[in-house]
Amino acid sequence: MNRYFFYLAVLALIFGGCSEKKQELSKTYTNGIGMKFVLINAGSFMMGSESEKREITLAESFYLGATEVTQEQWEKVMNSNPSKTKAAANPVDSVSWYDVKAFLSKLNALENTTNYRLPTEAEWEYAAAAASNDTYSFGSDEAELRKYAWYYNKNDNKKLLSAQAAGQKMPNQWGLYDMHGNVWEWVETVYNKDFYAKNKIDTIANTGNANIIKGGSAYNSAEFLRSSVRVLQPSSYKADNLGFRIAVTIKN
């Protein structure tokens, strides 16, 4: 099949107007500006740290970016680059939650859809864990972390001074790169300490006073890279170790 028509067919399945079943969707697809997405099937998992673990159900499958949004991809949409250290293949950084929202609005307009969004915290953690109940997606052996993540390892000779090109390390078993380390990632969910205690089906917690970032960064040590770790920041916060990746809603 011609690559262009294959791309249109995938978009038709994802963005509606087709009666195909979700399980017939492609496991991956690439959009018009070169972003690759991986299909994450609906399911349940144990969310949170050991002191607060609870089973959460994701009722709907979705797509998630195989990598963090790169500076090159950001520039194609926004015609600018806010990142501290400029490198096309590196994750875009120094973007607030509001900046990300502006990017998504423009990307949706470019792709003629409304389905690009940030993942919820539960979606992000489910995808990062990749069906594992361990500390990291690959298990709990910190010695293995350097295969999957850019991070601060006290045994290295020097500390990383910036994020690295996306997708260089090993992916998790679902084909997602840099879910641990490189840059922190914004999620959609606003923090509410009681939300997951009262809700077993994932939705967006839209009451609270801080947004959540996940995943750790190249500047952080291993304990910050655990799948369950969350850090709270105001929506206006920007940092040179903070970026994001995109989720895509799949229409019935």
Image (cartoon, grey):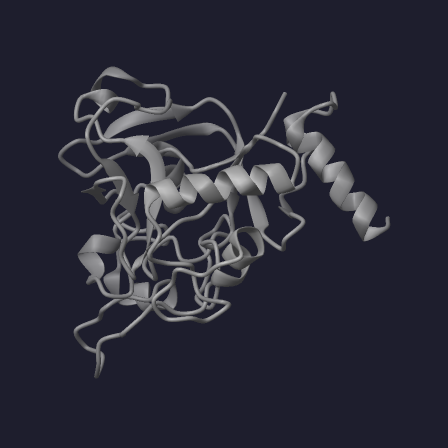
Is residue 133 at least partly visible in the picture? Answer: yes
Residue positioned 28% across, 44% down in the render: 213
Residue positioned 30% across, 24% down in the render: 205
Residue 251 location in percent, x, y? 61, 24
Residue 63 location in percent, x, y? 54, 39
Between 129 and 224, the residue placed more toward the observer is: 224
Residue 135 location in percent, x, y? 26, 49
127 left or right of 121? right
Residue 211 location in percent, x, y? 26, 37
Residue positioned 48% across, 44% down in the render: 103
Task: Residue at the far right: name it.
Answer: 1
Residue positioned 50% across, 40% down in the render: 104
Between 53 and 217, the residue placed more toward the observer is: 217
The quarter of the displayed image where residue 109 is located: top right
State whether residue 193 is above or below residue 246: above
156 left or right of 1? left
State whether residue 234 is above or below residue 81: above
Task: Residue at the far bottom: name it.
Answer: 157
